[in-house]
Image (tube, grey):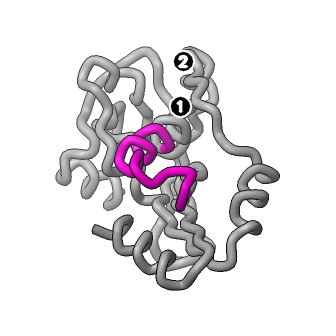
Amino acid sequence: MKQLTEEEASGWNYCAEHDTNAVVLFVQAKRDDPTKPRCILDARDRNEAVDPNHTRLLSIEELMELVTARKYWSKIDLADGYHNITIEEDLQQHSSFLTHMGYYCSRIMQQDDRNDPATMVRAMYEIFKDIVIKDLVIYIHDIIIFSDSYDEHLATLRKVLQ
């Protein structure tokens, strides 16, 4: 498929053959561009072989308590941020997936793998360690910025967007 070929050309994926793999299905997208097929990765079997990362994620209740106590808040969606985190070379074999075109391995994180949310949160906490919790929290693939004053909120937004 065109998407798989483009990802291989960009260096995201490469041809390989491994024992641990997930099945990829291409289905018609319901949102965004319905003419563009959406890649669905069934990683359930592969995820069973992976030790879970126990990075603690905030509960919805904890998140709401932090945000609702402040007057201003913003959310930045980093769903595509997964594609900016590379997988260590010796671990890429665990990212293999099977398509009708053969076996592939991924060089970048995929959203359907067991430890991806925790890895994404840890990476974002490392980047924003100076302002985390005081002015923002990371929740799965969202950055939520909150402030008591408008000027403080703009200052935090500038820090985040630099």
Vertical order, 24 against 17 (above or below): below
- Identify the mark nearer the N-term, 2 or 1: 2
Q: Residue at x 60, y 24 (%)?
A: 54
Numbered circle sitting on residue 115: 1
Q: Which residues are magenta?
A: 121-136
Q: Is residue 29 visible?
A: no
Please, is residue 31 above or below residue 103 in the view? below
Near mark 2 (Cα within 10 A), the count class, few <14, some 14-19 or many ≥20, is few
Name the side, left or right, on which 150 lies relative to 154. right
Quarter of the image holding residue 89? top left
- Residue lying farthest to the bottom in this orientation: 150
Disc 2 secondary structure class: loop
- The reply to whether the C-beta atoms of the residues labelled 2 and 1 are less than 8 Å apart is yes
Residue 63 visible in the shown view: yes
Q: Quadrant of the C terminus?
A: bottom left
| Pick the front one: 139 or 111 | 139
Near-viewer residue (101 or 83)? 83
**Kind of residue at badge 1:** Asn
Q: Amino acid at mark 2?
A: Val
Residue 78: where, in percent of width, then height?
46, 61
Magenta span contains residue 106: no
Q: Is residue 131 magenta?
A: yes
Hey, which quadrant is residue 6 in on the image? bottom left
Report the residue at 51% width, 55% height from top.
Answer: 26
The residue beneath circle 2 is 50
How many numbered circles are shown?
Answer: 2
Where does residue 25 sit, x and y in percent of width and height? 53, 48
Q: Residue 123: x and y, percent?
A: 40, 41
Q: Secondary structure at mark 1?
A: loop
Q: Which image quarter: residue 57?
A: top right
